[in-house]
Image (spheres, helix red, strand yellow):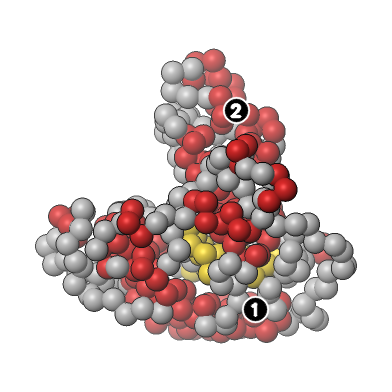
Amino acid sequence: MTHNLCLAYGLYRDMDVYRPRKATFEEMTEFHSDEYAAFLKRVNPDNAHEFIKDLQRFNVGRTGGDCPLFDGLFEFCQSSTGGSIDGAKRLISGAADVAVNWAGGLHHAKKSEASGFCYINDIVLAILEMLKYFPRVLYIDIDVHHGDGVEEAFYVTDRVMTVSFHKFGDMFFPGTGDIWDKGFGPGEYYAVNVPLKDGIDDEGFESIFNPVIQKVMEMFRPSAIVLQCGADSLAKDRIGCFNLTVKGHGNCVRFVRNFGVPTLVLGGGGYNIRSVARCWLYETAVVLDREVDEQIPYNDYWEYFGPDFNLHIQKSPMENSNSKEYLDKLKSKILENLRCLNAAPSVQMQEMPPIYIDSDDEDNMNPDSRNAEHFDDAKQKRNEFYD
């Protein structure tokens, strides 16, 4: 639906659009265990009875669970992950200053376990790719749920700072992300958690997002940014309990982009598909610095956006449990923690590996000419779209 809106608004004219490449098994196991990845590759609804113990062990297909087993699961993971990894490679090569993969952002997946509708953690894999070239990577998460899988992966390193703005308390999934969770060992103070309460609106969110990110940029000085834009923090989400509008959510993207740092923009959660598509279309326009009409043009999903066909949604009349006093205390504590960082961490100089852009038809390619020029292999031509 988001892609269709980008076509309807004509945003594709200002972008290079690529077909997602399927990530390889070897790429996935840069973070995930071989055993877990092999399980995802082999299991399907027809042979699930052969994997009873593994289904429980890896938290897939459990009755009442949040990681269902479905046909094409591994292929979905390959496409989602391939888009994020290749987006990272385009930033590394300088082919783009911002890359977008709305099918990525699956921030709950663990090394050997699925969690929260997330099976393969494309974010961690993209960051690992970035770390081959960039000294420091900043991860920012505005999903209503805590970005626990990404934080856990980099909890003891100072080369990645994770910053998550999320609902915390009341047994809300995943139950992690307290303000006191701030990293360990070399990574102490490099995990930043902003635990929020129900009903936070645009003004309240901006009052804490902007100063925290501003301080993070000053202290950490990242070489690249990964921004997870989970849309379940929007008002009227079926699972989320925040009260952000599309504009408020998009203002976070605008604030981050204004720093001019290479940025990988990813999707994430969202359980009201009409709001999700609106949000990610608007944020695509923000990234492109384009103004878009509030009236949604005709598209293949036209009926989904009725009856008003407006791009922007209104806040819910819900109570905001985040008082100014609470937000001020939260901000004060987080900024105090950030001041414990003496300087941005340095990285030992070493020879950088060549930039290798994978292709689905790489077996037919000349091995001596595999380089950034093959970005164009998966680029969709203008005549594949419509005006």
The reply to whether residue 282 is visible in this rendering is yes
Q: Is 232 situated left or right of 123 in this image?
A: left
The reply to whether residue 23 is visible in this rendering is no
Residue at the left extreme, as displayed: 307
Q: Is 258 situated left or right of 279 in this image?
A: right
Q: Quadrant of the rendered structure where residue 329 is?
A: bottom right
**Which residue is labeled 2 in the image?**
39
Q: Residue at x 44, y 23 (%)?
A: 45
Residue type, numbered disc 1: Val
Q: Residue at x 36, y 65 (%)?
A: 12
| Residue 218 percent across, percent down from the top left | 67, 84
**Which residue is labeled 1 in the image?**
216
- The answer to whether the residue labelled 2 contacts the one labelled 1, judged by CB atoms less than 8 Å apart, is no
Q: Is 109 situated left or right of 319 in this image?
A: right
Q: Quadrant of the rendered structure where residue 363 is?
A: top right
Q: Distance between the residues labelled 2 and 1?
A: 39 Å
